[in-house]
Amino acid sequence: MTQQVFIRIGVLLFATTFIVSCMHTTHIGQPFMTVPHPGKYQLIYHTPSQEFPLHSMATVDGREFLAIDDVVLPSVQSLYLLTHWKIFDGEAVLDLGTGSGVQAVFAADKASVVVATDINPTAIKMARLNVQRNGADNIIDVRQGDLFAPINKTEKFDVILFNIDYPHDEATQGLWKLHERFFAEVKNYLKRGGRIYYQSGLIDNAARINSMANKNGMSILSMRMDVALEADRQPIVYLIKRNLDVEVKTGVWDR
Ligand SMILES: C[S@@+](CC[C@H](N)C(=O)[O-])C[C@H]1O[C@@H](n2cnc3c(N)ncnc32)[C@H](O)[C@@H]1O
């Protein structure tokens, strides 16, 4: 009798453990760090999940983003840009250098169409996976290529988001060429009144960014910046418009 009771308890314990472990064979790993940053969204890094054991994972306000190899998870800079752009219902958005796809996924809450591009084929795979897992594949079109190469000359956007690596030390000065190309081309892809939210940390970069914008018939209308963060670079978001679209030159952050 006692033996039967023990067997039953054993079976019950096994079944409970099995069910609980099945419930934990989830798509999401354990949170190990909530990242402090000055933006409004919560950024948490997780351990790899059982479903994606080789991927790193972050959640941004509970939305999951996977990354692998050289693809970057949403960072403090990503979250700062995310916090400071404003997209209105039905707008067309271009997210250049989408990485994990975080800007595109949040933009799709409001936009009617989002085109997300990246030069890195692995980033494209990750962005597509993250877009699909966040249920935004009906709005977001992910395309591979260098800057505007995957964009048709006739495509125009209300909002262009840019958070691509920027020069921050001697070794990364070569990145200015990429930013110069961005400023030379971006005006061709804006709708009338369109705006650019451009993330580039380091206040020392501001003068050069201003001159690249001016040289191409654009102006910085506003900047959002925060103090330098521990173990990270200070995020700065610029709102930039073509001069022909600027009606009021100061104090305009949205449209
Ligand atoms: C710092 S990550 C930022 C990712 C994302 N925008 C975010 O906010 O989290 C920069 C991304 O830009 C991509 N990238 C770099 N050079 C590029 C280029 N010439 N054209 C398109 N994407 C580029 C990289 O592959 C990388 O995924």
Image: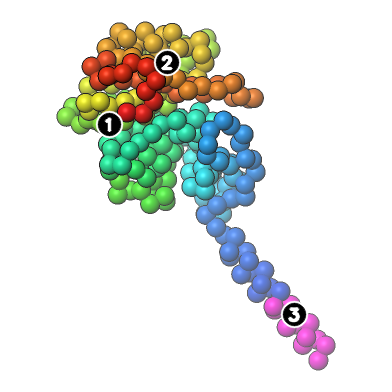
Percent x, y of residue 216: 28, 11
Most extreme residue toward the left is: 154
**Amino acid tagged 3:** Ile
Circle nearer the viewer, 1 or 3: 1
Percent x, y of residue 231: 63, 25
Q: Tell me the SS state at disc 2.
A: helix
- What is the distance, in whole Å, between disc 1 and disc 2 at their CAs? 26 Å
Residue 219 sits in quarter: top left
Instruction: Decide if ligand 1 comes within 8 Å of the CB at mark 1.
Output: no
Label number found at residue 9: 3
Is residue 144 among the parts visible in the rendering?
no
Pointer 1 with pointer 3, Cβ within 8 A:
no
Q: Which residues are magenta?
A: 1-12
Is 173 placed above or below 47 here? above
Percent x, y of residue 65: 48, 44
Which of pointers 3 and 2 lies earlier in the amino acid sequence? 3
Q: What residue is shown with label 2? A: 175
Q: What residue is shown with label 1? A: 158
Residue at horizontal 41%, vertical 49%? 134
Closer to us: 246 or 170: 246
Side of 82 where 111 appears, left or right: left
